[in-house]
Image (cartoon, grey):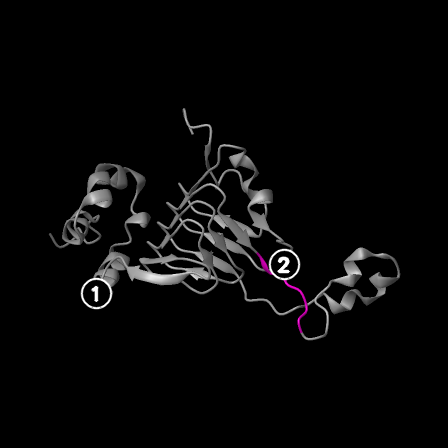
Amino acid sequence: MPEQPRVVLLKPLVSSPLIEVGEFSYYDDPDDPTAFETRNVLYHYGPEKLVIGKFCALGEGTRFLMNGANHRMDGPSTFPFPIMGGSWAEHFDLITGLPGRGDTVVGNDVWFGYRSLVMPGVRIGHGAVIASGAVVVDDVPDYGIVGGNPARLIRRRYSDDEVDRLLAVAWWDWPPEHITEHTRTIMSGTIDALEAAAPRTDSAHD
């Protein structure tokens, strides 16, 4: 991004077919933000996907652990002998097809704090906030704030009724020029103001 060498938009950078990132989601890292796909999405051997919505802010060190990190736990040892090769390689069937938790899915407008960690198969709702250092092991509700290790729900940013209204407005799906026109309302306005600013979809019955 202009004059921000530590910030990159992720969608143009991602090359893996197993990663989907929405428009304007960015990653911030003073070291090498362009290496996000290899340094921050770990043990990603598939078939599970990482899906990140639009307008997400990923702080430095945000990492996603994928199902490839899984080890067997149904026997005496969790050590993955077959990956060491040699005569152990003949037992490769013992480490393939381990149970996974499915895709990791992040909604729109999610803020990840410094060095937050998301475990495999977690689903994070729209408008959520992930505190710095949080280890997210369970799903996060829309507009929830979580923190800690393991991360726990600290509070919701809005009431259930307000969340329903925000999801109905879905400002992240507005045309870019409409978002630009109403940036102040999106950032600091009320839900009433946001609803009033929403694009008119029914112009035939004015």
Q: In this picture, which residue range is highlighted in magenta?
A: 66-73
**Residue drawn where x is 46% and y is 59% of the image:** 149
Q: Residue 146 in the image: x percent, y percent?
A: 37, 58
Which quadrant does the N terminus fall into? top left
Between disc 2 and disc 1, the foreground one is: 2
Q: Where is 169 relative to 59, above or below?
A: below
Spatial CA span between label 2 and label 1: 38 Å
Q: Main secondary structure of the magenta part?
A: loop
Give the residue pinned by disc 2: 69
Regarding mark 2 in the picture, which secondary structure is present there? helix
Residue 123 horizontal side relative to residue 70, left or right = left
Q: Nearer the viewer, residue 137 or 167?
A: 137
- Amino acid on which the number 1 mark rests in the picture: Asp
- Amino acid on which the number 2 mark rests in the picture: Ala
Q: Nearer the viewer, residue 13 or 5?
A: 5
Give the residue pinned by disc 1: 161
Q: Nearer the viewer, residue 198 or 76?
A: 76
Residue 162 horizontal side relative to residue 7, left or right = left
**Residue drawn where x is 25% and y is 63% of the image:** 164
**Residue drawn where x is 31% and y is 40% of the image:** 176
Label 1: how many Cα within 10 Å (few below 14, some 14–19, many 20+)? few
68 within the magenta span: yes
Q: Residue 138 in the image: x percent, y percent?
A: 45, 65
